[in-house]
Image (cartoon, rainbow, N blue to C red):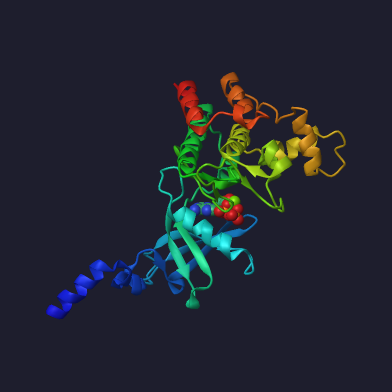
Amino acid sequence: HTVLGKLTEIMIKNPDISPSENLPDKDPSMFHKRYLKWMKDLGEGHFGKVTLYLYDPANDRTGEPVAVKALKQEDGNVESWMKEIEILKSLYHSNIVKYKGCCTELGGQVVQLIMEYLPKGSLKDYLPKRKLSMPQCLMFAQQICEGMEYLHSKRYVHRDLAARNVLVDSDNLVKIGDFGLTKYIPEGEIYYRVREHGDSPVFWYAIECLKENKFSFSSDVWSFGVTLYEILTRCDPRKNPPMKFKEMMEEPQGQMTVMVLIKLLERNRRLPCPKDCPPEVKMLMEQCWAADPRQRPTFRSLIEKFEGIRR
Ligand code: ADP
Ligand code: MG
């Protein structure tokens, strides 16, 4: 009795030695690889691969479906991968995909990220199949802004906002779903500088990201403008941003380099206005693409504007 009392007392004082930390079975965020049953591949981007599994510890198919994200190559950047997991773990918002836990292999090596499964997939998978009404488009756009405002309030820049990274929960709810390039901006600083473009999603990038590798809260707003364009074109592959920018080039045969894209943007060329786009929304989109980052709206002011337009 007294020994148990003493032990409890020690555990209260030292939460990190409590049994739930030592016995993975008691920790609902620890998923065991042996209980994950493959169902289907959901998609992949540059760095990650996402797979649908049934997590079925009882082994009777009563388990829950979960989306599992893993690094694509074994030799990928493990450090930034662990960061992505830590970031998602720290985010709680109705417009951000829910973190469920991790799956560690013996030795704690390959770590997979377990998140809620959204059966409708990304906006890019979903929109071309639907005839989404303008009010629904604007509702989705506002929800993305709500998730982004929350992210920025935590001083994170997303750096990869695009329709492919927004997941659809239902006809009335979308969630931001990929934080692979997200970076923290320390208090007092205004941008994050990257070393190389590599496989960067350049057609979603603001002009200063292309020219100076500077990523800020305002450059996310630019990418939101491109995402809004994608929503309004219902992610029609014939109108997607890379395609449209290539059409705008003088010599369509030539390679679309970052330099050519910069020149286009410097001449104030922008993506065309999607058809049926209300004039107030066109204005918002253009404000997001202001050459001067300081002239762009914040996500807070975008939310207010969408509320006004949707009223
Ligand atoms: P990457 O970092 O490689 O770009 P993403 O996290 O964007 O990976 O996921 C790639 C694709 O997988 C998405 O575009 C989407 O189609 C699908 N996907 C990702 N997460 C989920 C999820 N939670 N539920 C359903 N589909 C998902
Ligand atoms: Mg992605």
Q: Is residue 277 visible?
A: no
Q: Quadrant of the C terminus?
A: top left
Q: Nearer the viewer, residue 95 or 211?
A: 211
Q: Nearer the viewer, residue 292 or 144?
A: 292
Instruction: Determine the image quadrant of residue 1.
Output: bottom left
The residue positioned 47% from the left and 23% from the top of the image is: 310
Residue 109, x across and y down, in percent: 52, 73
Report the label total: 0
Q: Is residue 159 above or below residue 180?
A: above
Residue 124 x, y percent position in the rendering? 60, 44
Residue furthest to the front in view is 188
Q: Residue furthest left?
A: 1
Q: Measuring from the top left, give residue 277's x and y in whole percent.
A: 60, 24
State whether residue 16 is above or below residue 172: below
Image check: 75 left or right of 91? right
Residue 14 coordinates in the image, percent (x, y): 28, 69
Q: Nearer the viewer, residue 311 or 77?
A: 77
Left or right: where does residue 242 sit relative to residue 121?
Answer: right
Foreground pick, 94 / 67: 94
Q: Is residue 70 left or right of residue 103?
A: right
